[in-house]
Every structure is written in C-alpha cells, then in structure tokens.
C-alpha cells in the first residue's frame, strides 16, 4: 500500500485527533484486523456482527499501531488513551471518504467490473491486457465491497495510470451505487445477470437493477462495456449517459468472436473482430466463459486506445486462469479446482469442460449452490441432469446438493453414472471414498459454494508432492 498521510485522513474524513501524533505522520498500512496490525499501522475499528472492532483498540496498541480510526460515539466514553485516536462519525464511511479522495488525487482511469459471475476472472484478464501499455493496478482477491474497494484504492501507487476494480453488489439496491461514488469509474464492465443471490434480492429483475447502478453512475464521458449476448445487460445501454460498446458472440456486437475452437483443458482459439479489426487468438483460458472474458478485455483495451496486436500478448499468460486450476491428484489423477464459488451456469460450464477433457474416467464432486432462494431445488436439478450426461461418477456434498444426486440418478443418460451422496457432516467420509477410487487418467472436478470450503477437499485429494498455490 502507498503510505497514507495523517493529513489525508483528517482532511477527507473531517476527523479530529486525540492524543500525541506528529502532523506529518505517514501510515504504512491500513489494517482492520487487530491481530494483524504491524508497527506504524492505522487500525480501523469496524463494528462487526460478532465483535466490535473498537473493543480491540488496546490489542492494536499492543501490536504497535500508530493510531486508531474510531467512531465519535465510542470515543466519548474513552478516558485513558491506549494510542492516538482519529475520531470520525463512522469509521467505514471515513475509510470510503479517504479512499475516494486518494482516487481523485491520483486520477487514474478506473475500470469497474461487475456481474453475477466472472467478475474476478474478468478483472484479471482486463488487467493483463491493459498492462501491455499502462501502469495498471488490479484489486487483489475479492476486495469488491464497501470495505474492500476502499482498501484497494488506498493500495494504488502514485504512478498508477489504470485501476481495474472488481465491484460486487448484488445483495441490496444501492450497493453498487455506493461503490461507484467511491471509485468513480471511467469505464464500467457488466459481464452478465444470472439468478445469484436470489435469496436476498428476490427476483432476477432486482439483480439486473442493482448491476445497472454502475452504468448509471457513469458521466457523459464514461464508457459502458456490456455483454450484448445477455438481454438484461444489453438493456442497460439505455441507462448510460456516455458511450456504449457491446461484446459477445452474437451478430451486432462491436467486439465479437467467430470460429471458436475449444481445446478442452488446453484453452481455446477464435477470430476476434474488434470494431472491424480482426485478430486470431489462442488463449490458455478454459471453460465456456473464456471467450466472453477475452472479448470484454479486448473491448476495454480498444476504448482506451490499444490495438488488437498490442493487446494480444496479455492474453497468453497462463496466470490469467484464476478460477479453474489444474492440480495433480492422487494416483496419477488430475483435479480441476473450481472451488471459488458455484452458480448453475458456472457448474454447467465446468461439467461441459469435464465432459470434453478426454479423461479415462470423469468424476465430479459437487457441493451446494447457495443463495438461490425459491428456485434452489430447480437449479440443483438442472445441474443434476447435466451431470448425468457428463460424468462417470458423481459425488454430492451437502443438503441442497442431494437434489443434484436425485436428478442425476433418474435422468435418462448414455453414461448412467454412479451417484453417491454425502451430508454436510460427512466430509471425512467423502474424502476417504474419493481417495480410494482415484486412478491414472481420472479427471476430478471439485466445485461448490464458497462457504462449503470445497478447497479443503482439493487439498485432501491432491498429490502431496505437488506444489501448492
């Protein structure tokens, strides 16, 4: 992170200083976890569901924090200072204000990426393309919410020309509007609108409405990059005050793919038409979504003045494949680690890739898909029907995933896979069952919602000598 000046915090957040702290103090890091504080950090006391960060100010002091950003309400009752306090109305709001001021001062071109699925992957591919010309910053991991986004902005170096930021939203109306006010995107990318977070949002129309907030936030000089193959995303063009560019495989998109060839686990190739300029590409990305990710990145690069030939080298780095990792498994097997999260579309896409893998035996270990609300059973059964035609052995994990197993066991299929179910409390039994059946040439897909910790199953099934990461 670029150093943060005390003056920046006081000025942007309208804070007051209590305690002895030099006016020219620079904080090397901003830290929200008191247990991870290092000497010289600014500790931000964030109220949580289980624990109020204000209660951990003494711990932050013991670990060497230079100061703590705290609420005015809490500070009223403090008599003895454990460390200097920067007192504001609300620490999270203050963090957002400081980050937004930093964004204004550095004035990079900000590319904000949202959508139901594929945001993290799109962020990585877009950043890899833009880095061929620009000093490019990308938000790390999934720092994509009202706290993570400000922390990302504060990490930018002064020389940053383009910042590629993932913007989540999707839990409530107004979330992306807030993120857009903080980051002020110049370019907004919307990948898709799918029935994710239905449990919270209620309808897919509501999901589309919140995703559109980042497009509506663009100024007249802004540019919306929209998936033209998704009708809900394409409709957002009417909400944009600036320029609109669409990408996809369908006719009519300004950036489109033709003659797509899949090489299974080795990637894909296609002709890309970027507003009339054609380029043949071979990329290491795998899965049905790979082409859309590349097209989105080409569209962003194009509107920022790059040529297709200039962008192409950024698409050849295997590191841009962040969602689905190939991991050596036990007994000569291969694991497809796609454990980041799970939606109907992403699971079906992964199953299609598994089907085309050329494996000796195709095995899928699938967990619950969460937050699907009233369509949960239906969507799990869609996955079950697809799995029946794609795998030789299906292993499900979780209560909701039992519907995947039920459907796969009864669906007409040329494969007629073996189907085994495990409850949430049977993780150990699942691992033991799969480990005992892995052999040379087997390819195993592992996928499920993030809260199921499916990555732990991958670790239990991997070849011990294989490198991690």
Image: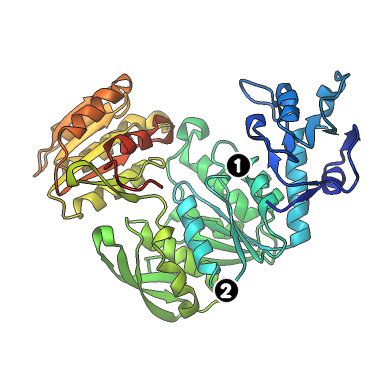
333 or 201: which is nearer to us? Answer: 333
Give the percent coordinates (x, y) of residue 260.
Answer: 29, 68
Q: Name the side, left or right, on which 330 lies relative to 22.
A: left
- The structure residue drawn at horizontal position 37% and vertical position 32%, both measured from the top left corner, is 375
Residue 275 in sight from this viewpoint? no
Task: Name the image quarter holding residue 54.
Answer: top right
Check disc 1 and report its element: helix, strand or loop.
loop
Q: Name the side, left or right, on which 235 lies relative to 269.
A: right
Task: Name the image quarter holding residue 188.
Answer: bottom right
Q: How many marks?
A: 2
Q: Which mark is residue 133?
A: 2
Q: Which label's residue is closer to the chain start, 2 or 1?
A: 2
Residue 341 in sight from this viewpoint? yes
- For disc 2, the neighbor class at 10 Å (few under 14, some 14 to 19, many from 20) is some
- The structure residue drawn at horizontal position 47% and vertical position 55%, both measured from the top left corner, is 191
Q: Are marks 2 and 1 in contact (CB under 8 Å)?
A: no
Q: CA distance from mark 2 to mark 1?
A: 28 Å
Give the percent coordinates (x, y) of residue 332.
Answer: 18, 47
Position above or below: 423 against 124: above
460 or 447: which is nearer to us? Answer: 460
Give the percent coordinates (x, y) of residue 444.
Answer: 23, 43
Check disc 2 and report its element: helix, strand or loop.
loop
- The structure residue drawn at horizontal position 73% and vertical position 48%, both measured from the top left corner, is 99
Give the percent coordinates (x, y) of residue 292.
Answer: 41, 61
Q: Which mark is residue 145?
A: 1
Q: Name the side, left or right, on which 39 lies relative to 247.
A: right
């Amino acid at each position: 992170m670029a150093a943060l000046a005390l003056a920046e915090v006081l000025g942007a957040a309208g804070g007051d200083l209590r305690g002895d702290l030099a006016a020219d103090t620079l904080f090397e890091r901003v830290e929200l976890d008191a247990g991870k504080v290092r000497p010289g950090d600014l500790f931000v006391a964030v109220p949580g569901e289980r624990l109020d960060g204000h209660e951990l100010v003494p711990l932050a002091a013991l670990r060497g924090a230079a100061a703590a950003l705290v609420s005015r309400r809490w500070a009223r009752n403090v008599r003895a200072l454990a460390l200097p306090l920067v007192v504001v109305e609300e620490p999270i709001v203050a963090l957002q204000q400081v980050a937004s001021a930093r964004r204004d001062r550095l004035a990079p071109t900000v590319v904000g990426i949202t959508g139901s699925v594929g945001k993290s992957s799109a962020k990585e591919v877009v950043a890899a393309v833009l880095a061929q010309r620009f000093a490019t910053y990308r938000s790390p991991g999934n720092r994509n919410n009202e706290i993570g986004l400000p922390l990302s902005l504060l990490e930018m170096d002064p020389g940053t020309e383009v910042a590629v930021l993932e913007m989540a939203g999707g839990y409530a109306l107004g979330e992306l509007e807030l993120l857009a006010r903080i980051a002020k995107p110049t370019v907004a990318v919307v990948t898709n609108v799918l029935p994710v977070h239905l449990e919270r949002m209620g309808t897919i129309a509501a999901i589309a409405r919140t995703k559109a907030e980042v497009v509506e936030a663009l100024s007249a000089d802004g540019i919306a990059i929209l998936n033209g193959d998704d009708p809900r995303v394409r409709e957002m063009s009417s909400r944009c005050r600036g320029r609109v560019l669409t990408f996809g495989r369908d006719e009519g998109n300004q950036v489109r793919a033709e003659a797509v060839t899949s090489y299974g686990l080795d990637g894909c190739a296609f002709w890309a038409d970027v507003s009339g300029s054609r380029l043949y590409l071979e990329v290491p990305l795998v899965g049905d979504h790979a082409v859309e990710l590349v097209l989105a990145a080409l569209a962003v690069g194009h509107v920022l003045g790059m040529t297709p030939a200039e962008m192409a080298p950024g698409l050849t780095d295997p590191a841009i494949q962040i969602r689905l990792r190939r991991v050596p498994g036990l007994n000569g097997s291969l694991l497809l680690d796609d454990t980041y999260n799970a939606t109907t579309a992403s699971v079906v896409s992964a199953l299609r890739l598994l089907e085309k893998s050329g494996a000796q035996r195709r095995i899928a270990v699938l967990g619950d898909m969460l937050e699907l609300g009233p369509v949960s059973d239906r969507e799990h059964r869609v996955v079950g029907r697809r799995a029946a035609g794609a795998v030789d052995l299906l292993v499900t994990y979780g209560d909701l995933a039992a519907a995947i197993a039920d459907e796969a066991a009864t669906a007409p299929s040329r494969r007629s896979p073996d189907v085994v179910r495990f409850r949430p409390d049977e993780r150990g039994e699942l691992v033991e069952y799969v480990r005992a059946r892995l052999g040379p040439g087997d390819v195993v897909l592992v996928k499920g919602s993030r809260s199921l910790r499916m990555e732990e199953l991958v670790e239990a099934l991997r070849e011990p000598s294989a490198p991690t990461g």
